[in-house]
């Protein structure tokens, strides 16, 4: 969809539909109030009849409003003034946008951006959020499935209407940011939703090369093949891909948006394109969903794309180790001992704890970039879903200021994270009789012991780990990838370069 910002008298602007806000009880928003005055009290008169009192989510479509150039005026309930929250706005926007997209209005004037929300910082934030939410509402997976029914007159253009002309500059910048982040999220979702037989490690590598071609001047892409990984001694990563016929890839994407000598932020994303568990095979029901085990990698793609689109002045490197985890004759067996690139040996007690095996070598590889900080993103543990559900990503870090920065970015964007401890005491759970460490930590604290494992490969830099097993995907009837935590990470990166 196309977006733009408009200012000026709302009643004079031509469009198929003008959206205006009404608060409880029957209090018009400033924009609605100005339209009411032009129409000589038409809106107030209608509200007095009692069809709508402004409760959050209510909608009322009006036709032929006197003095108004728009073909229709839709009144939208926003609840009590000052009490509207992001989640209510999201719900209302989703319902309104979906309704409009199924109806006849192709260009719409959105007059709700100047509404104050108790948990959004201000206009810039609301504009950004509006674009992201609208794109979210209109997203449809069509890669291997036809769209349900084609409306000949879908929603095409959304103009965000502002009362105050002085807000124009700020709003335009936010709009561009919102579009960039939405574009990144879209890529993340698309990759996450693709089935494992299409989205293989080679496919992800091709997508990276394509991104490199689309942004030739700013993005350098390199794909390491198994031969090169062998030379580097990546015995942990390669032990996982040995169980599959698809060759592993280590995708490296380098965006130089900042000063040449500025240390880069490195994002490492788990790109496991299908996780059957290997010899420690998973139960059948729900196994289809394990195609989303590459969503950490897809988040790296999406975040990079958002940064490229915004031309953020930052140096950012994306590293995506990609493999399948299948039970083949040459697959890892419980009890096997492998040697990681760091030289540390690992006893593979459970072949289903494969994410940490591919990540540890990618983390060691990241040392070469002399990073300002490294953040890994991974659908790493089912235990994280037990702990936090689908509300928050699990966050663990070896540097508290970094953890705080990420928590803040999460709460500002509503793409929240919640920190779990990484106390020394948990490390013992990884003790092995036959190697430097085991790849599982026993019964309790599965999310934490997975991070403890990674912490042994991240001693040389400031590091944070996001476990997105619960947040990257929604299950149930409308199952699919969510595009999280692209909003969190882009906000974090914007903060890093003062945007
Ligand atoms: N990819 C899974 C984690 C996962 C589970 C993500 C469910 C999303 C939904 C990971 O590779 C895995 O299998 N982890 C094991 C670890 C265990 C063997 C210690 C798990 O969580 O069961
Ligand atoms: Mn697994
Ligand atoms: Zn996995």
Image: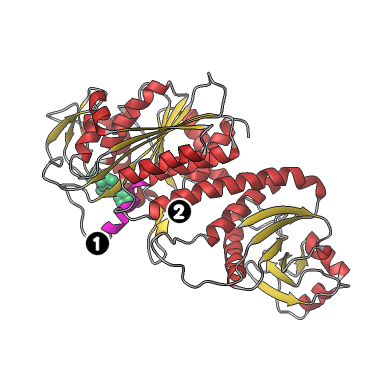
Q: Give the vertical position of 342 relative to 184 (above or below).
A: above
Query: How many labels were placed on the picture?
Result: 2
Percent x, y of residue 99:
59, 70
* Among the 4 quarters of the image, the one containing residue 225: top left
Kindly tell me whether mark 1's CB lies below 8 Å from ligand 1. Answer: no
User: Residue 449: in sight, yes or no?
Assistant: no
- Whether 105 is drawn above or below 391: the answer is below
Image coordinates of residue 251 in percent, x first then y, are 36, 35
Left or right, residue 21 beside residue 309: right
Find residue 288 and report its horizontal and vertical position in percent.
29, 58
Helix, strand or loop status at disc 2: loop
In the rendered image, residue 188 lying in the magenta stretch gets the answer no
**Which secondary structure lies at badge 1?**
loop
Residue 248 quadrant: top left
Residue bearing mark 1: 285
In the rendered view, does 484 fall on the left or right side of 104?
left
**Quarter of the image where one finds residue 336:** top left
Query: Which mark is on residue 482?
Result: 2
Looking at the image, is mark 2 or mark 1 earlier in the sequence?
A: 1
Residue at left offset 23%, top offset 45%: 325
Q: Please name the residue shown 50% across and 37% down the image.
A: 406
**Quadrant location of the C terminus?**
top right
Highlighted range, magenta: 287-294
In percent of width and height, residue 438 lies at 19, 34
How has the structure been colored for display?
Answer: secondary structure
């Amino acid at each position: 969809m196309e977006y733009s910002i408009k200012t000026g008298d709302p009643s004079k602007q031509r469009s198929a539909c003008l959206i205006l806000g009404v608060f409880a009880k029957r209090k018009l928003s400033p924009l609605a109030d100005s339209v009411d005055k032009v129409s000589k009290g038409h809106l107030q008169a209608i509200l007095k009849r009692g069809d709508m009192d402004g409760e959050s989510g209510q909608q009322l479509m009006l036709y032929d409003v006197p003095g108004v150039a728009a073909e229709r005026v839709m009144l939208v309930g926003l609840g009590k003034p000052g009490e509207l929250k992001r989640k209510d706005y999201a719900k209302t926007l989703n319902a309104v946008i979906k309704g409009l997209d199924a109806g006849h209005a192709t260009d719409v004037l959105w007059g709700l951006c100047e509404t104050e929300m108790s948990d959004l910082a201000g206009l810039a934030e609301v504009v950004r959020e509006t674009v992201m939410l609208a794109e979210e509402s209109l997203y449809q997976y069509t890669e291997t499935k036809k769209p349900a029914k084609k409306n000949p007159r879908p929603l095409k253009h959304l103009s965000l209407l502002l009362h105050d002309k002085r807000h124009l500059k700020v709003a335009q910048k936010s709009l561009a940011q919102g579009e960039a982040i939405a574009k990144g999220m879209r890529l993340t979702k698309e990759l996450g939703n693709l089935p494992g037989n299409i989205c293989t490690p080679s496919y992800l590598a091709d997508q990276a090369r394509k991104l490199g071609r689309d942004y030739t001047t700013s993005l350098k892409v390199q794909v390491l093949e198994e031969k090169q990984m062998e030379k580097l001694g990546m015995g942990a990563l390669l032990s996982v891909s040995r169980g599959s016929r698809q060759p592993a890839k280590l995708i490296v994407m380098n965006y130089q948006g900042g000063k040449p000598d500025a240390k880069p932020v490195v994002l490492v994303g788990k790109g496991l394109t299908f996780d059957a568990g290997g010899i420690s095979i998973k139960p059948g029901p729900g196994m289809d969903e394990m195609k989303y085990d590459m969503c950490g990698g897809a988040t790296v793609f999406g975040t990079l794309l958002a940064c490229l689109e915004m031309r953020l002045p930052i140096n950012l490197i994306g590293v995506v180790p990609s493999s399948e985890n299948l039970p083949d004759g040459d697959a890892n067996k419980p009890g096997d001992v492998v040697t990681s690139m760091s030289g540390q040996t690992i006893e593979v007690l459970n072949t289903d704890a494969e994410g940490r095996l591919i990540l540890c070598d990618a983390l060691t590889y990241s040392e070469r970039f002399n990073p300002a900080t490294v953040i890994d993103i991974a659908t790493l543990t089912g235990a994280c879903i037990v702990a936090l559900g689908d509300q928050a990503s699990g966050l663990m870090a070896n540097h508290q200021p970094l953890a705080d920065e990420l928590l803040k970015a999460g709460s500002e964007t509503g793409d929240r994270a919640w920190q779990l401890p990484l106390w020394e005491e948990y490390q013992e759970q990884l003790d092995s009789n036959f190697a430097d460490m085991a790849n599982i930590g026993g019964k309790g604290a599965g999310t934490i012991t997975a991070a403890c494992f990674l912490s042994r490969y991240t001693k040389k830099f400031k590091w944070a780990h996001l476990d997105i097993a619960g947040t990257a995907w929604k299950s149930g009837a409308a199952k699919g990838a969510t595009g999280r935590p692209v909003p969190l990470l882009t906000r974090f990166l914007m903060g890093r370069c003062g945007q």
